[in-house]
Image (spheres, helix red, strand yellow):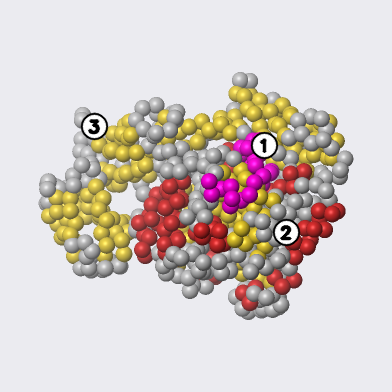
Amino acid sequence: MKKLSLFIVQLAIAFISVAQVSKDYAVMVTAEVSDSPPSIIVKWNNSADATAFSVYRKTESSNSWGAAIANLSGTEVEYIDNAVVVDSGYEYRVYRSASSGINSYGYAYSAIKLGTTDYRGKCLLVVDTTITSSIEIELNRLMKDISGDGWQVKRINVNRNDSVKTIKNLIVTEYNADADTKCVLLFGHVPVPYSGNLNPDGHPDHLGAWPCDGFYGDMNGTWTDATVNNITASRQENWNVPGDGKYDQSSWGTIELQIGRVDLYNLPSFPDSENVLLKRYLDKDHAFRTGEFTNLPQGLIDDNFGAFSGEAFASSGFRSFAPMFGDTAVKELDYFGTMQTNSYLWSYGCGGGWYQGASGVGSTTDFVNDSVQSVFTMLFGSYFGDWDSQDNFLRAPLASKGQTLTSCWSGRPHWFFHHMALGENIGYSTLRVMNNSSTYFASYYPKYTHIALMGDPTLRMHVVRPPSSIVLTPPNGYPNTTSISWTASPDNVLGYYVYTSNTEFGKYDRISDTIISGTSFIDENLFTGVNWYMVKAVRLEETPSGSYYNTSTSIGDSVYVVVSGNENILGNENQFSVFPNPASYKITIQSSTSNLNSILVITNDVGRIILEKKITSNKTSIDISEFAAGIYFVKLNGVVKKVVVE
């Protein structure tokens, strides 16, 4: 039976005292851009009781707005900013004063033909290996997909029985060793940190420590376990006493790393195993990135709280969806009833909550039974913001057969996703929310330790279908070059960029200075060893916030090259076989053609080279008795074979 929330009682009071709706508390901001001459027209929705508007502008990275650049009357609905240039980003805030006393905010990030982001930093993929052995292929594909969107990727294997301190130390070590470390994706039931003495849903029986993934993203803050002593919460996991491994802090200073979690543990309402649920998530993550399914550019809001004494939880949706889709593409409809048959890229649902649902929205059981057509969602209500609980409503969308890949508890505080309209990933927005105190109107509980993203933080909104069938060959008469060709993207694109790296999941540098209109490219700057290549499609993405050059995820392959005078040994046309497979002590590599002076490379499942060997015949035996059990990849003359070592 659904547990009635204290929110329900408060809701009745709110409706009596404030005859307004959540939309009244949001300014729905969009932007139109022109490059000749450069200008950005900032626009917003009209309001009958508006008395004045103030427009502010800052750079994307700044946390301060400074003085208003325009103060306008309550009848104005736009501001033309001519002090802009092409390929620069500008963030706007519009503040509305009203005779009703409801003063509201809206935000947009805008640009005119903003350039591509070729490199985003390093992402740490922290994997709970307790239950992931059956999905190694899908995890390797995820690493390729993340790498293909401009990230270095480093996998860290952990056990769900490890301490949170152990895992935090692994992350801090990587961060200190490489300043490019920007993001962490926790995959599987990676141990959950708890911290604080808080109850952001307002319930006395929910006061205590809440799950705190921000602990893993804080690289230099102080975390203690000595002062909080509270065992009043009805859920024992929220109890917090000195020395129990749960931290004292209810808020943090600054979080350095973007962080998100895909954790489908303890969801018994789903008939499938945890492994099957994780595989399902990885499959739909890949399908979305590659354009196998697309959602209409619109946002759905199912608001069962209304203005709620001015908190207006659903204003999170109105503020974020307008700069993404335009104000007319934001619809107020039923959550499950609508999205079973209709497609929405974003959605928001709120109502009086319990751990497994929100009144007026639905329950975890609905996610078990229904296939919701929404990729990104925000949910809000009592209890389920404490997401490390059985059949939790915030984690359930990720396990569903539907399309949802991320969810967050937005309302206390509000979340802001307007940067995603210009190509930022959702982890970037998460970090801005975690560190927001006054830059954006947060309402209650800014910078509190309960703020967390469920889902893959590297995901972006706008998908371009990638090219396919990459082929790497040495052109006749041109030693020390690689000819790269591919099949065109099925989308309408401007062309392609080509990138190269010396490691599969390392930093890729763009080697094509301009957009390639055709489907081939010649690289004349090779190095001896493994040369990895990526090809991405490029499109000018035009949104209700402006325009930017967007890229697809990549297709990629590698060649082995010996650069010496006029020698260039590479190729991917020579097939070979590996046997036995699976193997325990020895494998044999046999090719139908001579492999004179070819380089054989064996890598593990995270791309680390385990063995490199020069071979001189078409049949070679390799001792693998010292290899740990797992999946390996054997590469010879550009062809890759997977081998299972038992």
> Looking at the image, do the residues carrying marks 1 and 3 touch, with CB atoms under 8 Å apart?
no
Q: Amino acid at mark 1?
A: Asp
Q: Residue at x 84, y 37 (%)?
A: 49
> Which mark is on residue 445?
2
- Which of discs 3 and 2 lies nearer the camera? The answer is 2
Which percent across, then down, holds residue 135? Answer: 38, 60
- What amino acid type should be assigned to the residue bearing mark 2? Tyr
Which span is picked out in magenta? 317-341
Q: Is residue 234 visible?
A: yes
N-terminal label among 2 and 1? 1
Quarter of the figure with residue 511: top left
On residue 542, which mark appears? none
Give the quadrant of residue 43.
top right
Q: Nearer the viewer, mark 1 or mark 3?
A: 1
Label of residue 327 in the image: 1
Magenta segment includes 499: no
Identify the element where label 1 is drawn: helix
